[in-house]
Image (tube, helix red, strand yellow):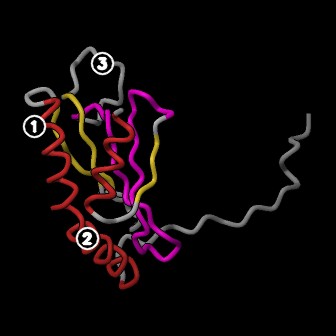
Amino acid sequence: MNNPFAEIKIKPELDLPESGDEFQQKMAKRDAIYDQYNAMVSEILDLFIAVHRQGIWEKDSDCSRRYCCHIAWFAGPKEKYTDPYDKHHAIRRRIEVRLEMDGLCNPTGFKVTNYEAIEKIVHVGLEKDDLVGGIKAVMD
């Protein structure tokens, strides 16, 4: 049998540069954006955990991807050996706050997700009160 995909012409993959000025600029921009919002989001997650999940949940953040536009914070219980979940995560995500970006990696708002009720996803603004309202909305 002839391979039906042999006729397709695909552009060669371009490797993402792991170094260089453009890559360093993207990482510096991502780090600056993370620093700008980290204290506020961490404080709000700490307040939520203190009232509802103290001693049960922990929080963490994720901005270690190679591309600049991925910044997220999350909270949940520590992983147990028996949990059917990705072994690379130390915390089982129950609530996630993802910073939404436009095409130029400029913050536009937060996406708040409750992974215990996946239909509960709320998009809110960048202000502290917006984020508090979003967490309340997905946890109701």
Mark 3 is on which residue type? Asp
Q: Secondary structure at mark 1?
A: helix
Percent of width and height locating residue 77: 21, 28
Q: Front-most of 52 and 115?
A: 52
As drawn, 26 above or below 111 = below
| Quarter of the rendering containing residue 1 | top right
How many marks overall?
Answer: 3
Viewer-side label of 2, 1? 1
Mark 1 is on which residue type? Ala
Q: Of marks 2 and 3, which one's residue comes earlier in the chain? A: 2
Mark 2 is on which residue type? Asp
C-alpha distance separating marks 2 and 1: 27 Å
Q: Which residues are magenta?
A: 91-119
Residue of label 1? 50
As drawn, 125 above or below 106 = above
Mark sitting on residue 31: 2
The residue at the far bottom in this view is 21
C-alpha distance separating marks 2 and 3: 32 Å
Residue at image position (88%, 55%) is: 7
Q: Front-most of 3 and 42?
A: 42
Residue at image position (35%, 75%) is: 19
Q: Is residue 109 left or right of residue 27?
A: right
Q: Secondary structure at mark 2?
A: helix
The residue at the far top in this view is 82
Residue at image position (15%, 61%) is: 39
Q: Is residue 42 left or right of residue 63?
A: left
Q: Of marks 1 and 3, which one's residue comes earlier in the chain? A: 1
Percent of width and height locating residue 96: 34, 44
Q: Of marks 2 and 1, which one's residue comes earlier in the chain? A: 2
Residue of label 3? 83
